[in-house]
Image (spheres, rainbow, N blue to C red):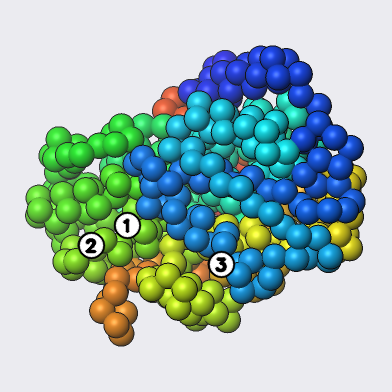
């Protein structure tokens, strides 16, 4: 393993080591230790969900649980004659806890399929465990770690309803440059998800002639953003890109407004900063008018989104978040695969082939499918926060980028020759010419 490829790779190596030791210690075989296990050809399909319902991202994790449960309530929990039985474990947003709970679900609860987790570092940890347990199938609707569908893909960890961290921010970087931004500052969370969000923006922004003059990183769980925002001089930059997540997001939003930056410095953010599980707890108008890029918009006027939003509001009395949509779509994805296989999912390789071939035309995200590398191809939305007719904060669609892949406008092979985005690698010096582009080489890049 090339340890030069940044901290995300180091986390991967650690997760793989822990998973390997755990597998040997447990003496584990297939799921549940039996021929049928939690999947098989008959009987119930036992699913273990790994959602963080406590800790920094508890609100988002609870939304994941709500979305998963809503699909089965609306559509029935029997698919092709097989009963879907779910067992939930709280990961608390911690990679070590995620591994512990995954082992419990497989060894004690005998599940054949896992769903989750949420954070990118959790996903890297679970991927290592699943690689050592190839008969267990993991559905990954939210752990958006880029490398899990690029250089370090684990075949039995499928992005069913999932995404890549940098996919929505790649159009964001290109958009910012096209608006005339020449100099930008980025502020992202100091772990894999933040590096990948910042990297997607920085890479495409610099492709189009922009310069990232400063990159700031805040630890997950930051309570005070003033020291970071104090480093932004409105006179020296054309705009700022920000990524935050969970309980950190409303603290950033408040600081941006309190320090007088709203309206003075153009701002665009990643998906999770203005995520619905964040917005619903904000009573003032601090976020109104601010823009972000994401693969989900609760205000989208598509049938799949509108139906999901209406059902979720009726069931839970609030607007659904991306996290709710992700697990709702994972359930839809699993249902489609089990139906296609007529309930017989005893052949793990056949199940994986079917899951990877699912194409959903109208999810709560819009159309969604997987590419040849297992990465999600879906719409990316430029969104603006507004007040809905009932006074709630919601993301409205400003612009739709259809069918965006994890490679954006780059040639896959050229993109994969580069390291995964990390603190050390943000793509600002790549590419140097048009040879790396599959289409739409930026003006001035050179031949």
Mark before the other along the chain sequence, 2 or 3: 3
Label 3 sits on residue: 70
Q: Mark 3 falls on what kind of element?
A: helix
Q: Quadrant of residue 176?
A: bottom left
Q: Mark 2 falls on what kind of element?
A: loop
Q: How far is disc 1 from disc 3 in space, using C-alphas?
A: 20 Å
What number is the disc on residue 282?
A: 2
Residue 149: image location, x then y, percent: 66, 41
Give the residue at x 43% y 46%. Answer: 53
Q: Mark 1 falls on what kind of element?
A: helix
Mark before the other along the chain sequence, 1 or 3: 3
Quadrant the N terminus occupies: top right
Label 1 sits on residue: 278
Give the residue at x 57% y 59%. Answer: 68
At label 2, counting other C-alpha atoms closer than 10 Å, the crowd grade (few under 14, some 14-19, many 20 or more) is some
Q: How far is disc 2 from disc 1 in space, using C-alphas?
A: 7 Å
Quadrant the C terminus occupies: top right
């Amino acid at each position: 393993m090339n340890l030069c490829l940044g901290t995300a790779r180091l986390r991967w190596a650690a997760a793989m080591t822990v998973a390997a030791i755990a597998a040997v210690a447990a003496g584990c075989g297939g799921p549940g230790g039996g021929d049928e296990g939690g999947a098989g050809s008959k009987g119930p399909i036992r699913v273990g969900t790994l959602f963080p319902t406590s800790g920094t991202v508890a609100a988002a994790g609870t939304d994941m649980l709500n979305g998963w449960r809503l699909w089965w309530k609306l559509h029935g929990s029997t698919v092709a004659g097989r009963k879907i039985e779910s067992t939930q474990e709280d990961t608390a947003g911690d990679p070590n806890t995620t591994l512990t709970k995954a082992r419990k679900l497989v060894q004690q609860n005998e599940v054949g399929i896992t769903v989750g987790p949420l954070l990118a570092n959790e996903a890297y940890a679970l991927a290592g465990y699943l690689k050592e347990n190839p008969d267990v199938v993991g559905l990954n609707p939210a752990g958006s770690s880029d490398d899990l569908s690029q250089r370090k893909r684990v075949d039995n960890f499928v992005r069913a309803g999932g995404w890549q961290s940098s996919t929505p921010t790649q159009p964001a970087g290109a958009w910012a440059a096209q608006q005339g931004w020449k100099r930008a500052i980025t502020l992202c969370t100091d772990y894999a998800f933040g590096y990948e969000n910042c990297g997607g923006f920085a890479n495409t922004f610099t492709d189009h002639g922009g310069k990232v003059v400063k990159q700031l990183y805040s630890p997950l769980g930051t309570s005070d953003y003033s020291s970071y925002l104090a480093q932004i001089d409105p006179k020296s930059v054309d705009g700022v890109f920000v990524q935050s997540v969970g309980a950190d997001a409303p603290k950033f939003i408040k600081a941006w407004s309190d320090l007088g930056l709203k309206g003075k410095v153009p701002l665009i953010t990643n998906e999770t900063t203005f995520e619905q599980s964040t917005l619903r707890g904000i009573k003032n108008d601090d976020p109104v008018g601010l823009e972000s890029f994401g693969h989900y918009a609760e205000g989208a006027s598509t049938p799949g989104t509108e139906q999901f939003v209406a059902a979720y509001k009726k069931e839970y009395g609030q607007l659904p978040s991306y996290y709710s949509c992700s697990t709702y779509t994972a359930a839809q994805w699993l249902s489609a695969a089990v139906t296609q296989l007529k309930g017989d999912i005893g052949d793990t390789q056949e199940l994986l082939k079917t899951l990877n071939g699912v194409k959903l035309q109208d999810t709560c995200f819009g159309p969604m499918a997987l590419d040849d590398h297992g990465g999600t191809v879906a719409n990316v939305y430029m969104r603006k926060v507004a007040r809905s007719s009932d006074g709630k904060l919601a993301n409205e669609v400003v612009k739709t980028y259809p069918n965006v892949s994890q490679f954006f406008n780059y040639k896959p092979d050229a993109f994969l020759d580069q390291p995964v985005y990390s603190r050390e690698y943000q793509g600002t010096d790549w590419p140097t010419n048009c040879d790396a582009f599959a289409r739409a080489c930026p003006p001035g890049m050179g031949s």
